[in-house]
Image (cartoon, rainbow, N blue to C red):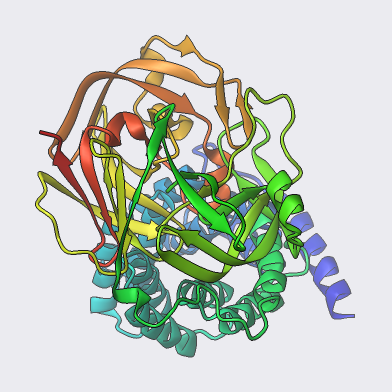
Amino acid sequence: MRSGFRIVAASAIIAAAGLMIHADGQVPSQSADIQLRLGRMLFEQGQYPEALDAYRLAVASEDSATVRQARSGLVQAALRVAEFVLARTEADALVKMAPRSPEALALYADSLWAAGLFEQAEEKYREALALAPELARGRHGVARSLMARSKLDEAMNEAQAALRLAPRDLELHHTVGAIYERMHKYEEAAAAYSNYVNLLPNKDKSDKAEWARAQIRFLRSFGQRLPFDMDPGADNEIYSVDFKLEKEKIVVRAKVNGSGAQDFVVDTGAESTVLTRPTVQRLGIVPVTYTLSAGVGDVGLRGLQLARIDSLEIGTLKVRNIPVLVKSPPLRDIPSRETESLSPLALGFSMVIDYKAHKLVFGKHLPREPSDFDLPLRVYRLATVRGVVTGGHAANFVVDTGGEVISISHATATAMGQSEYRRIPLKVWGTSGWEKDAFLLPGVDLSFDAIKYKNFPVVVLNLDAPSVLLGFQLGGIVGAQFLKNYRVGIDLENSVLRLKKDS
């Protein structure tokens, strides 16, 4: 009966909303108020695109208080449907209307986070908390920022504090789950993700919701096994292995489940260890469930399998109970076979890449090395650094040892007014198939702190699908074209990318 009442009520509001709009584009306050209430109802029911439309109409109100509330709802709805640019624009307008409002500042920070501007977002979250220390959304934002800086205990404290203030905020439960997962506490992570799913509206069939449901099944499949288990003292060791370079990719030898050593690409652009279907079949590894993955290519979102391996050996390091992503079903019509890959970052290790000596060094606690450039590093599912492109547009770039070139997203190209430049069509192969709409864009200015590229050609890729799945806009990717000029240190413990010029 209750759900039926909601449908009737919504219909009544829609019918009543057909009022006149002023010639100046403003909506009479009564009509705007109806649209505002409709937007809230649709948002609560998980009908985010419809809520977005209602909030858009309410924003045209002639009443400033209604405009503020509608704009707040508009930002939240835009974030739920991954309209990152719209969310940033409306949040900017909101904070100009109410520069001292903690809620407005926190929403503005949410929009900065969704734009991939993690450092600026944290500043605004802390500014909001200075005005309202018990603001749940502010504490949540700080928790995410601390997690991205690998300060997991502090992040959990902030996230739990936010939950005590807003126990029915589903995003807080999701963030708690993500922190527990980074801590390798899989049962607690599964419980938090379950709370998130249970709070979702019935109509929410988003990719993020489907990912969470699959992740719950996978995490619980570990049972009493300790994820990423290692021998006593392994945390304090430093490991070194030789690698070869093949088509600008770092290739090392590793063993799965005690089998013979095989080639793995070191891919910091991947969230986990990746195996191909032939390897899984050969070793008798049984997949647990399906999940969603996304990468460069026309396929966009790609359904893959999740599995668990008993052991992974790299040099003298042996790690047990490792989650892996299985490239199954495999892609068709590909120029070369898909490969296995691993990332020390995904295993929780900092790493140093010496391209000149062909040495990979990794460990939980690496000594600080001399460097020419120190770039702030944020790891929120992927490791990213901040860059600035032509026109002063800031964007985040994935640090991707599995990639070859420096690329920017379509969104970044649009922000810098790329239509003014010559576009050279390219056919690019990515983890999600052929990227047929890719193109080379010459004449771009790029900077990463003191590192400058003037009048530089970059590859422009469609990164919308991975951005939606990650929950923030990817600005671009820096691959071997950027990294191979340096001795590269990716320091998780201190959240910094250290670069030392090759002498």
Residue 173, image x and y in percent? 55, 78
Residue 122, image x and y in percent? 29, 64
Q: Nearer the viewer, residue 358 or 61?
A: 358
Q: Quadrant of residue 442?
A: top left
Residue 283 vs 144, above or below: the answer is: above
Q: Residue at x 63, y 65 (%)?
A: 309
Q: Nearer the viewer, residue 64 or 117?
A: 117
Asked whether residue 262 appears in the rendered view, the answer is yes
Q: Nearer the viewer, residue 218 or 469?
A: 218
Side of 101 where 325 appears, left or right: right
Side of 11 where 200 appears, left or right: left
In the picture, the quarter occupied by the C terminus is top left
Q: Residue at x 61, y 81 (%)?
A: 225
In the picture, the quarter occupied by the N terminus is bottom right
Residue 207, image x and y in percent? 67, 55
Q: Residue furthest front?
A: 260
Residue 502 vs 217, above or below: the answer is: above
Residue 62, image x and y in percent? 47, 53
Asked whether residue 98 appears in the rendered view, the answer is no
Q: Residue at x 27, y 67 (%)?
A: 493
Q: Quadrant of residue 267?
A: top left
Residue 437 vs 178, above or below: the answer is: above
Q: Residue at x 37, y 35 (%)?
A: 479
Side of 384 where 196 appears, left or right: right
Residue 272 vs 218, above or below: the answer is: above
